[in-house]
Image (spheres, grey):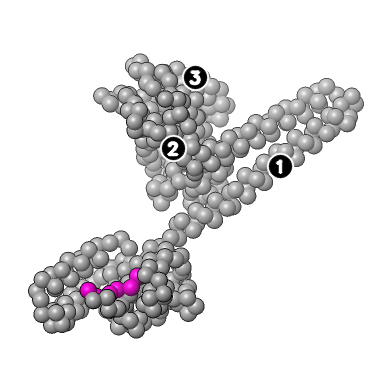
Amino acid sequence: MNATSKMKKIKLMESMDKETLDATGDNKDISDLTFKKFIIDSLPVAVVAVRPDLKITSFNPWAEEMTGYSAEEAMGRYCGEILQGGMCKTDCPLRTVINRQKPIVRVESTITNKYGETMPVSMNTAGLFDNDGKLIGGLEAFQDISYLKTLEREKANLISMIAHDMKSSLVIMGGFLLRLLNKGADIAEEKQHKYLEIIKKEGNKLEFLVNDFLEFSRLQTGKLKLNFSATSLDEILLELFEAYQPGSIQRGLKLELKNENVLPIIEADADRLRRVFTNLLDNALKFSKEKGTITITTQETDQDIIVSVIDEGIGIDPRDVPYIFDSFHRGQDKGKREGYGLGLAVVKAIVEGHGGRILVESELDKGSVFSVVLPKDRKKEIYPLSNNE
């Protein structure tokens, strides 16, 4: 907003405040009004106030941001003309509260901004009444829920993909088993062995899909259970280092484990933590560049143990970083990525179930660092996910 626009807006507000003061004749009232206006203008939510005839009397900065209209442009015009809401012509929420059919209306709808762009919004509408209960107008507060709607679509699409992949594995397994049952005696031993290897591979894939989906279901319902016992992170990391070493060499990558000092034993769910580090290593392998290095490091502070997985891969788009731990989020280049966007969501839930946190630093084309921070001492009353106490 340029200086001229700011000055116009200030004059408009001063004019509105003067009219209110003239009407009330009370300095305290205008002081209260100014304070309330300050709060409304500071909210990260679009807020629009209207008179009983639905003409706009207040239009906060977030409303300006979402609609593209300045407060000066919107003031005095019908709200339907500015918001072009999806329900304006059929079931207007403001008319509902102004006609006192309902005190508050909560709906999901759409608005269309000044530039013709339509966006989904979550909307709360309420009537405004004076101290005597007389209707003086209505208030509409709304937020952009485009991201949530995108996630919902991704969720629906990916559930279909999971179901399709499960069916594909079952069809392949069924086909080869049928061959072995019907013509087993006529099939050469070498070919039988090949068929069994394919069946085993598809069975493992199916097990992975089912486990991923079960983990997600437990996440959604808050029933992800952790079984705590004395756990050595040194043993888990060494075991995984040795397991991933052959695959890293095969891919032309160097895998390093740097944990020179022995880590203290902690109370943890060893199997779940193994799942955490397995997921991080799988991602590091998947997105590393040829001849790159993947490094596992450990660090101990007074309160925590920090395990980091560092790669020299493709990095993460800055637009994706805030959302990478959300279920079903697969990033800007999702068309090129395998998986269903569940792995890191499960990782975050497991780490937080231990009272820890997971941090990420990434730079495009240079690589990523995922750090798992685990407390040395588990405060039992804080972590209700455990089921063995």
Specify the amino acid type for callout 1. Ser
Label 3 and label 1: CA atoms lie apart by 33 Å
On the image, the x and y values in percent for residue 41 come to 25, 66
Relative to residue 246, is residue 39 depicted above or below?
Answer: below
Which residue in the structure is indicated by mark 1?
Answer: 168
Q: Nearer the viewer, residue 11 or 244?
A: 11
Mark seen at residue 276:
none
On the image, the x and y values in percent for residue 261 come to 34, 16
Mark seen at residue 239:
3
Q: Nearer the viewer, residue 223 or 204?
A: 223
User: In the rendered structure, does residue 153 fall within the stretch colored magenta?
Assistant: no
Q: Which quadrant of the figure contains the N terminus?
A: bottom left
Label 2 and label 1: CA atoms lie apart by 30 Å
Q: Main secondary structure of the magenta part?
A: strand
User: In the rendered structure, does residue 128 fall within the stretch colored magenta?
Assistant: yes
Relative to residue 92, is residue 301 depicted above or below?
Answer: above
Q: Residue visible at 32% across and 24% down?
A: 377
Q: Mark 1: give few (<14), some (14-19) or many (20+) Cα within 10 Å.
A: some
Q: Which span is picked out in magenta? A: 125-131
Q: Is residue 209 visible?
A: yes
Question: Is disc 2 placed on a helix, strand or loop?
Answer: helix
Q: Residue visible at 28% across and 62% down?
A: 43
Q: Is residue 134 left or right of residue 291?
A: left
On the image, the x and y values in percent for residue 339 come to 56, 42
Question: Which residue, as the protein is rendered here, is positioned at the far front?
Answer: 132
Label 3 and label 2: CA atoms lie apart by 23 Å
Which residue in the structure is indicated by mark 2?
Answer: 349
